[in-house]
Image: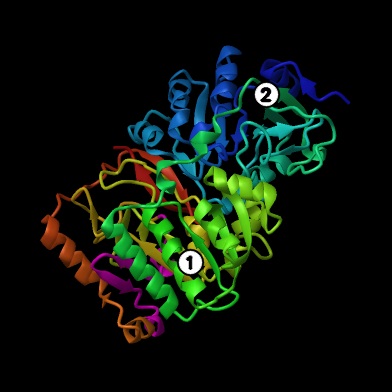
Amino acid sequence: MAKLCDDLHQAFVHSGLEDGMTISFHHHLRNGDYVVNMVLEEAARLGLKNLTVNASSLFDCHLPLIDHIRNGVVTGIETNYLSAGVGRVISEGVLKKPVVFRSHGTRPADILSGKSHIDVAFIAAPTSDEMGNCSGKYGPSACGSLGYAFADAMCADKVVIVTDNLVPYPLADASITENDVDFVVRVEAIGNPAGIVSGTTRMPKDPIALIIADYAAQAIEASGLLKDGFSFQTGAGGASLAVAGYLKRIMLEKNIHGSFALGGITGYMVDMLESGCFQAIQDVQCFDLKAVQSLRENPRHFEITAARYASPAAKSTAASSLDVVVLGATQIDTEFNVNVHTDSNGYIIGGSGGHTDVAAGAKLTIIVAPLSRARMAIVVDKVLTVSTPGRFIDLLVTQYGIAVNPARPELKMRLKAARLPVVDIHELRRTVIEINGPAASFEPKKERVVGQVLGLDSQIADLIYEV
């Protein structure tokens, strides 16, 4: 059976791609991805219209998508994250239909259940053989884990592997395997691996971020969860990464041997694995090239699917075995609801990713954030968009102290006993007003919906309006 196509055009013809269909993509090449743009360019060249793009995330390297929306090639987007450049234009109403926002866990849940149907999946593979056995660990564009692409490969009507490193059959250490693949296309380059390292994955030098990280690490220690068998996830933001650094020091000083680290993995988590802080890393996405190398070379660092990571429909997930997760926020309100979708002016600048999934699953969910950024308050009376409900959040750690969700009185007692600076979240709100002055309130026009945020039950949990 011949699967190898001469080019994308031939793959389009063989796959039967037509107007009105849904095509999907994964985002492991992050801001270095070339595949979304090259597929949409081919769709435009062939005159296809009314396509829906279902992508696990979209970055500003995908800004040509906006032209394809304007010329009618793309009329629908489903995703877990939109970076600020693409998000700004979407917020201004360029797309006729609202963007459907899922989380990293609900996307595979809906694909595997059939709620979210994919006609043709285009999977960027840094290495593949001609039958479609492929991996993200090897090749000039190696990106590491392909965790978000598994559901697409298993459920799409047709699966097209796009690779720039075709190797002899069979590829021994394959992630996605030939039984799920229809066609293989070799192209000159699928992306720039340097683009998988975003600016948010670097350790901060900002003293405020370091104060917040120190408080957060002390709060984890005081919670009683930091002991042998401890499991941990942190985000890729500066303060979140700094928490990992402080936590590593505590674990080494106290000879604590954790169970596993989870999620999007950075070199800092790899350092903790190699230092003996954890027995294993469960990796659904690599955030930098050190993590890619570790996934390739260390058998204790292994790839998992997005469904195994956090699907709410799964029988169990890694997220549900998590002790502590440290996450960021663009806004958090006095009910502990967190916004990671929009900025203070209502523009889309992100998405849940795995935020809601792991916040719901972990025993202790910590938000680390400064009280304000560029004189815009992070702690507000009411968030513009509820990305993660307040019932999933246990602590807010700022440079002015730690607010404990009133639903966790025992945690508050532990932190006070450890002499940590516990404050009421309403006090933090008053402090930020005293510092910045009362901000002019932003009220969305609510004339047109540009985004639907789905909750863990796949139902609409909140709406984002045109700016």
Residue tagged by mark 2? Answer: 17
Q: Residues within 10 Å of mark 1 (few under 14, many from 20)?
A: many
Which residue is at the far right?
Answer: 1
Q: In which quadrant of the rendered view does residue 136 lie?
A: top right
Quadrant location of the N terminus in the rendered image: top right
Is residue 150 at all visible to an observer of this figure?
A: yes
Q: Residues within 10 Å of mark 2 (few under 14, many from 20)?
A: some
In terms of depth relative to the viewer, which is nearer, 207 or 17? 207
Dot 2 falls on a residue whose secondary structure is loop
Q: Amino acid at mark 2?
A: Leu
Name the spot of residue 105 as percent of width and height, x first. Answer: 58, 54
Q: What residue range appears in magenta?
A: 387-411
Q: Earlier in the sequence, mark 2 or mark 1?
A: 2
Calculate the distance from the C-alpha at mark 2 to the C-alpha at mark 1: 50 Å
In terms of depth relative to the viewer, which is nearer, 299 or 363? 299
Callout 2–callout 1 Cβ contact below 8 Å: no
Q: Residue at x 40, y 85 (%)?
A: 410
Residue tagged by mark 1? Answer: 248
Q: Amino acid at mark 1?
A: Lys
Q: Is residue 394 magenta?
A: yes
Judge from the rendering whether residue 353 lies leftward or rightward of residue 414; answer left or right: right
In terms of depth relative to the viewer, which is nearer, 118 or 320? 320
Is residue 114 at all visible to an observer of this figure?
A: no
Q: Residue at x 71, y 29 (%)?
A: 160
Name the spot of residue 235 as percent of width and height, x first. Answer: 46, 55
Q: Is residue 89 above or below residue 154?
A: above
Residue 416 has which mark?
none
Judge from the rendering whether residue 28 lies leftward or rightward of residue 406; answer left or right: right
Dot 1 falls on a residue whose secondary structure is helix
